Image (cartoon, rainbow, N blue to C red):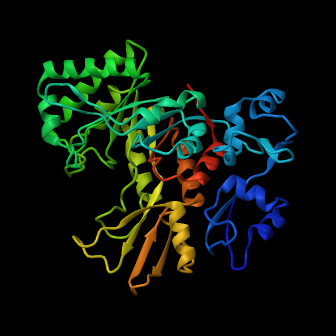
Amino acid sequence: MIIYTVKPNDTLSSIGANYGLSPQFIQNINLLPNPLRLVVGQSIIILFPEVSHTVKAGETIYSISRSYGTDIITILQNNPFLYSRTYLYEGETIVISYETDREKTVISNAYTYGNLKTDEENLSYPYLTYVTPFTYGFETTGSLVYANDINAIKNVAYFGVCPLMHLSTFSSKGNFSSQLASTILNSPDVQNVLAENILQNIIQKGYCGVDVDFEYLPAEDAEKYAKFIGLLTEKLNAQGYITVTALAPKVSAEQKGAVYEGHIYPLIAENSNYCFVMTYEWGYTYGPPMAVAPINNVRRVLDYAVSVIPPEKIWMGVPTYGYDWTLPFVRGGEPALSISNSRAVETALKYKADIKFDEQAQSPYFFYTDEDSRVHEVWFEDARSIYSKLQLISEYGLSGCGYWNLERPFPQNWMILNNMYFIKKI
């Protein structure tokens, strides 16, 4: 795999000619937002087919997979342009396999709000082990507040993906309720009711387990939270289900702050099957312009995490989005706009801005001036930044990664993941 950075006057044709590949093939694996107009600094994935097939009349994805001793999921992983197709064109080329040196099998999870369009779901599902609809809540009695999860779970079995139930203290006001969490964590009887309701919902809906996400817990509830996770894990594991716990991105055990103090890494890890470390949101809606997940900060979190958690229990968080800030930044002023990575490139194209790359953060960014003469600063993810993050899975010996979230499609990410690792299927 080569990640090519667009230079002035480059086109898909000229890039393809350099590597002996057709412009259509490059578009097929990148699904660029505007393949006819590239942006200086934009990243392009270059992959080299090992085995390809020219479609004959009457052939289907299934029949082609059978003839090569592979499966439909592998064909879809290698040919993302097929994600919204129910047919093949005679004469078109399908990649059966790529040149790659991948050895490690990883778990890939992604969060969704549960109301995605089918095409967006289908694009991502071949590359996932789990999908997690956001979010179930609960009452102080232990009864569940149900999520909008129907669309997110109805088709995943076809793609070999298993859904995880997401449980959080996220309230109707749009924040995490530490008071609600504290009420539960200080009542063993209510915890038992909640755990039983979770188990029954998992069985009824066909979930593979639960992802628990209690944020902004007070320090005095930290040990109680770890104990509750242990109760839940014991109950679910006995029935063949898993428990995943989301962790704030800590760099030390003593780290101060409302988001950190309620998560005791080693205790939670001991009581969970997996831990999802939320290694993103350094650049965020109300903060100053910077990378969402700068690699140097991600490394600091992982350095601490693997010192107290078995690496094979860790899923690294990966963002699928960026932010657009209006300058000058004023704390408490206009919030940054959350955008997809594709939209970031489209914005750079619209305003004729060259994309730059911060080597320390391993993240792309650019500036532009809008129609009202306001200057903007945009940070986002591209093929280069995602590649640098996904390398950490092997480097640290992690079991996989989790994406926030599927609301913003990011085709290049999935092709990079697929080229670097085998993806575990349930």
Residue at the image position 17 percent from the left and 35 percent from the top:
181
Question: Toward which corner of the image does residue 224 lie, by quadrant?
Answer: top left
Q: Quadrant of residue 233?
A: top left
Q: Residue 330 location, x and y as percent? A: 26, 76
Q: Is residue 311 visible?
A: no
Residue 39 horizontal side relative to residue 237, left or right: right
Image quadrant where one finds the C terminus: top right
Residue 336, position as x, y percentages in the image: 34, 67
**Number of marks:** 0
- Left or right of 375? Residue 10 is right
Residue at point 38% right, 46% down?
278
Would you place residue 234 above or below residue 156 in this image? above
On the image, which quarter does residue 383 sit in?
A: bottom right
Could you say where residue 59 lies in the image, as x and y percent from the top left? 82, 34
Q: Residue at x 87, y 47 (%)?
A: 91
Q: Among all residues in the image, which is located at the extreme top?
A: 238
Residue at 56% across, 60% down: 382
Does residue 361 lie above or below 95 as drawn?
A: below
**Is the residue 103 above or below the residue 368 in the image?**
above
Residue 35 position within the rendered picture, expressed as x and y whole percent measured from the top left: 68, 65
Do we see residue 211 in this rendering? yes
Could you say which is closer to the camera, residue 36 or residue 151?
A: 151
- In front here: 210 or 244? 210
Taking the image as shown, residue 391 lies to the left or right of residue 167, namely right
